Image (cartoon, rainbow, N blue to C red):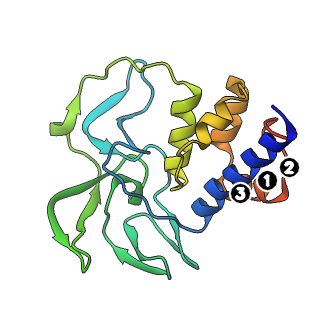
Amino acid sequence: MNTHNVGLLHVSLLLLFVTACEGGEVDDDGSGGGSATVGSTGAGAVCYDVPVNDATDGSAACGPEICGAGSYCFATVGICRPGCLSELDCAGGEECDLSNATPNENGDPVGLCARPGPEHEVPCSNEQPRTCASRCAGKATLCRAPNDDLCDALCAQSPSSDQLDCIEQTSCMELGEAFENGTPFCGVGG
């Protein structure tokens, strides 16, 4: 990869993660950052037929504020409201129960965070192999950032499994700062 392409990758990925750190909004259909599995896929795993947050602690940037678990960002100027729009607004292991949702001023259904009951437990299926593209897309969703072609550019560098683990474990803010400074992160880029 020539230096021009690496520079474009840095700028593109900077936008990806800076947007995340600035509280970019998610158009979440429930299939994104959370999943229907809690725990490992081995013995003792518990799986559900509803999306459960297993990606974040439920807090998210909202303009200059941080909305805690059980609240959602109503406006990017820093208005946190009680309730949830998706499982990502809930604490780990919780779902956003929309069964008795109330619409907010924008017409978005607002639910309540809750642990799924036993009626939602289902047998766990074997996980599909995690690819670079799926892992990058998961991190982009977690960071509430668009992933468009950026994951293709990252995966074109063939990061190792350890490098992808590092990216997944690095905070959005740290990744954004690395891109802003043009420094490699987790041994990728540079």
174 and 158: which one is in front?
Answer: 158
Where residue 46 appears, as percent x and y from the top left, is 33, 30
Which comes before the other along the chain, label 2 or label 3? 3
Mark 1 touches mark 2? (CB < 8 Å): yes
- Please state which amino acid type lies under the numbered disc 2: Thr
- Disc 3 to disc 1, C-alpha distance: 5 Å
Give the side of residue 11 with respect to residue 92, left or right. Answer: right
On the rendered image, what quadrant is the N terminus found in? top right
Give the side of residue 47 with respect to residue 155, left or right. Answer: left
Res. 178 mark: 1
On the rendered image, what quadrant is the C terminus found in? top right
Mark 3 touches mark 1? (CB < 8 Å): yes
- Please state which amino acid type lies under the numbered disc 3: Gly
Which comes before the other along the chain, label 1 or label 2? 1
Give the side of residue 175 with respect to residue 91, left or right. Answer: right
Give me the residue at 41% from left, 21% from top: 127
Task: Tell me if residue 134 can be seen.
Answer: yes
Give me the residue at 22% from left, 33% from top: 121
- Please state which amino acid type lies under the numbered disc 1: Ala
Give me the residue at 55% from left, 24% from top: 131
> Which residue is denoted by mark 2 in the rendering?
183
Q: Quadrant of residue 154?
A: top right
Q: Quadrant of residue 27?
A: bottom left
Task: Tell me if residue 185 can be seen.
Answer: no
| Label 3 packing within 10 angstroms: few (<14), some (14-19), many (20+) | many
Give the side of residue 140 with respect to residue 84, left or right. Answer: right
- Disc 2 to disc 3, C-alpha distance: 10 Å
96 over 47 or under it: above or below: below
Look at the numbered disc 1 and give the secondary structure of its residue. Answer: helix
> Which residue is denoted by mark 3 in the rendering?
176
106 over 125 or under it: above or below: below
